[in-house]
Image (spheres, rainbow, N blue to C red):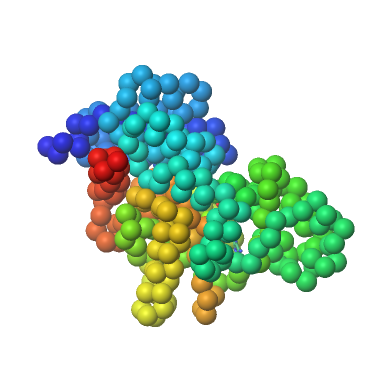
């Protein structure tokens, strides 16, 4: 039996962000995959409330982070585990905090020359300049901090603009306005610096919103991209550049829109969905890696990095 299988592993999940439900599913799926694979000392910890105190008390060998959204994906839990000297899967504090805030990510992308849709912050003054804003339509209005397409609106008609800003403000103090990019939506899973096969995301409704993301059959996921190899090589490089620019470690997922001419990085997800049918496990399966093997790579990477520190 591999020594990893007898390590004390805590799977941190739940939390109290808007993505709690998604995280509960991710954590439970990781637990099941590892349990079925013969892991002996697994504990699920819901970080909502005082569940987190168990981490301080019982000190696991390693934590598998299945948290999405604020408090889990934003560097908070990473800093907490750093201070306890407990290894954990995925990116560290700084990369997590950077990637979680879309405003900071965009500033960083612009500085690093990573192609991303044109953007600016929404402002209270916007209401007085709706006529000028009209020329920019369609735009995407989204909370700077958050995920799962929550609080995001594609604005086609200027009369919907302020409503969209108000909605996004419910989730985040800062709100981003981005040019809408028409094209193929692609996602690139990166595992410890290696890019897995890209997935073309085709929502039946045409919009990859919360429902399309988490309802069975609501989205088609294709590995046949209809993109020439040379171009695909460039897209892989762009995804890896985005992963590196953020300073990601372990597993991350880079969301891209490709117009047929140019590719734009939307964001980097440092703790992507981790159910057996989520995008990263799907991409791993495409190269012959089971869900449990993928989790094992993540755990080994976490322990290996801890050894180096
Ligand atoms: N600039 C854009 N142009 C076109 N579609 C976009 C744009 N920004 C976001 N979207 C759509 O909204 C979805 C969610 O946006 P994203 O920026 O990835 O935020 P999150 O997934 O964190 O909610 C994307 O997967 C895409 O379908
Ligand atoms: Mg996204």
Q: Is residue 44 visible?
A: no
Residue 193 visible at all: yes
Query: Residue 207, located in which quarter of the rendered image?
Result: bottom right
Q: Is residue 67 above or below residue 132?
A: above
State the residue at coordinates (44%, 28%): 46
Location of residue 110 with respect to 48 vertically, above or below: below
Which residue is at 37% across, 74% downward?
233
The answer to which image quadrant residue 62 occupies is top left
Position of residue 168 in the picture relative to residue 254 (left or right): right
Residue closest to the eye, 293 or 206: 293
Percent of width and height locating residue 309: 30, 41
Q: Is residue 61 left or right of residue 145?
A: left
In percent of width and height, residue 232 lies at: 39, 74
Total residue callouts = 0
Give x and y (percent) for residue 203: 53, 61
Residue found at x 38% / y 25%: 55
Residue 11 in the image: state x and y as whole percent.
36, 33
Most extreme residue toward the left is: 1
In the picture shown, does residue 302 fall above or below 111?
above
Residue closer to the observer: 305 or 218: 305
């Amino acid at each position: 039996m591999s020594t990893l299988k007898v390590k004390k592993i805590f799977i941190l999940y739940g939390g109290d962000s808007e993505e709690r439900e998604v995280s509960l599913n991710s954590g439970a799926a990781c637990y099941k995959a590892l349990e079925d694979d013969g892991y002996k000392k697994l504990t699920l910890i819901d970080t909502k409330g005082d569940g987190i105190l168990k981490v301080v008390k019982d000190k696991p060998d390693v934590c598998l982070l299945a948290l999405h959204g604020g408090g889990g994906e934003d560097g908070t839990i990473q800093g907490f585990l750093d201070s306890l000297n407990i290894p954990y899967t995925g990116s560290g504090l700084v990369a997590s905090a950077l990637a979680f805030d879309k405003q900071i990510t965009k500033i960083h992308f612009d500085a690093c020359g990573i192609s991303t849709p044109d953007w600016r912050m929404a402002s209270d003054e916007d209401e007085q300049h709706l006529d000028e804003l009209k020329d920019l339509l369609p735009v995407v209005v989204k909370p700077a901090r958050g995920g799962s397409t929550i609080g995001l609106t594609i604005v086609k008609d200027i009369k919907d603009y302020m409503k969209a800003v108000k909605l996004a403000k419910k989730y985040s103090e800062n709100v981003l306005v981005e040019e809408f990019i028409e094209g193929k939506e692609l996602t690139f899973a990166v595992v410890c610096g290696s890019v897995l096969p890209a997935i073309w995301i085709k929502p039946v409704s045409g919009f990859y919103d919360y429902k399309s993301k988490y309802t069975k059959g609501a989205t088609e996921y294709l590995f046949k991209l209809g993109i020439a190899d040379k171009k695909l090589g460039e897209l892989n490089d762009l995804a890896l550049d985005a992963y590196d620019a953020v300073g990601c470690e372990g597993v991350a997922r880079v969301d891209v829109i490709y117009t047929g001419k140019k590719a734009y990085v939307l964001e980097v997800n440092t703790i992507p969905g981790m159910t057996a049918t989520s995008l990263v496990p799907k991409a791993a399966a495409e190269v012959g890696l089971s869900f449990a093997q993928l989790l094992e790579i993540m755990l080994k990477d976490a322990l290996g990095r801890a050894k180096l520190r």
